[in-house]
Image (cartoon, rainbow, N blue to C red):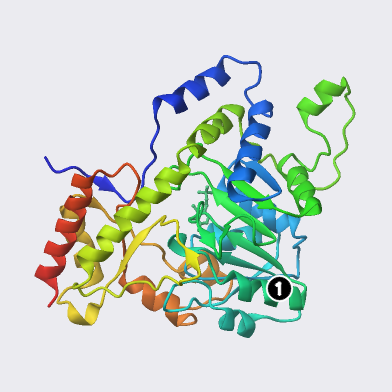
Amino acid sequence: MRKFLPYGRQWIDDADIDAIVEVLRSDWLTTGPRVEEFEAKFARTVGAKHAIAVSSGTAALHTAVYAAGIGPGDEVIVPPLTFVATANCVRYQAATVVFADVHPDTLLIDPAQVVAAASERTRAVIAVDYAGQPADLDDLLTMARDHGWILIEDAAHSLGARYKDRFVGSIADLTTFSLHPVKHITTGEGGVVTTNDDRLASRAKLFRNHGISTDHRQREQQGAWEYEMLDLGFNYRITDFQCALGHSQLDRLEEWVARRREISARYDDAFRTLPIEPLIMRSDRQSSRHLYVIRLRLQKCRAERATIFRALREQGLGVNVHYIPVHYHPYYQRLGFRRGQYPESERAYERLITLPLYPKLSDQEVRQVIDAVVNVLTELCS
Ligand SMILES: *Cc1c(COP(=O)(O)O)cnc(C)c1O
């Protein structure tokens, strides 16, 4: 029987379930000891001084933009080829989104395009580690230092990735992660902000708890009832049972990233002769392989991307497309963005298909993916 294989999915084992159940039987369901334990382990894992856990990857992005001090009138540079949340978090703080196109080799934000997009009002850049490959962090950090910008890294795809022997999460001023089930590890919904900067970390902690200076547990421990709301924040807290799950999942991160790399290498080998233009992997960094995308050479095919997509679906592959360029969405069109403005993101979008890739994929399922892709592309392309 052929199985339906989604493009990404979680892996929950008995240790994860036991960890959650233990918290459900305890005194703290939220803002208890598990949150800090998870944060400490996450920070150790990526080599950051601080990790602040929040309720989603989107909340992590919003928290980072707040911590960076972004507000009305400020401009933040983001790539168009990403999930909408990367740009939306700028709008949440009533700041202005400025897009800088991606580089065609890597589909990472192009530092030359960042220079072209910058203005007197630029305050930050949000780089996306597309598919798991770290962005051009040295170039972007140099630019940020020269101009006084904050570098935020949207690392929703790149937990466990390395850039020149450092883990993603320890390099940019602020790095954000998502713990959604399709990502490297999961807490159901969840996110993390990491930073080495004490001031940015304390602003992030304030923001996730309404802008209030102490949390409920701290007040309980001190036997105090006073609290002060110092700034306008949100309830972006994550629960203790989610953090128990995250803590347990982190034990398998290394093994899972290795498996993602192994499967990706197998795909690379199997697809070498197909009409696919591979993404270039820069030699100074190691992708943690969140997504495996194929970029079709459509001029060699008799069918459109949509037809190829449907044919792969019929073979049981839960293929997807990452991403519809952010500026194509009606909300961003209403802000004045137009199709044609970011040609590299647009050309990539028209040719991309995301294949199933997750650690739980068995060797036999990997075979199913390879056979389906080879069959469909052999039939529909020259
Ligand atoms: C998943 C993702 C997010 C949002 O994370 P959520 O946890 O779903 O809110 C943001 N940016 C990118 C690039 C993502 O892939």
- How far from the left and from the top, in percent, is residue 166? 59, 59
Placement of 194 over or under 323, stated as above or below: above
Residue 230, image x, y percentages: 86, 45
Residue bearing the label numbered 1: 144
> For the residue carrying disc 1, how many other residues have a C-alpha within 10 Å: few (<14), some (14-19), or many (20+)?
some
Would the CB of label 1 be found within 8 Å of ligand 1?
Answer: no
Specify the quadrant that holds the C terminus.
bottom left
Q: Position of residue 70 (x, y in %)?
A: 74, 62
Is residue 220 positioned above or below 348 on the image? above
Image point (19%, 49%), residue name: 316
Q: Nearer the viewer, residue 206 or 199?
A: 199
Q: Is residue 46 visible?
A: yes
From the viewer's perspective, is 154 left or right of 198?
left
Q: Is residue 282 left or right of residue 77?
A: left
Say which residue appears at 43% left-offset and 79% top-offset: 344
Three-letter amino acid code of the residue under disc 1: Ala
Residue 121 visible in the current orientation: no
Q: Position of residue 51 (x, y in %)?
A: 67, 45
Name the one closer to the observer, 257 or 217: 257
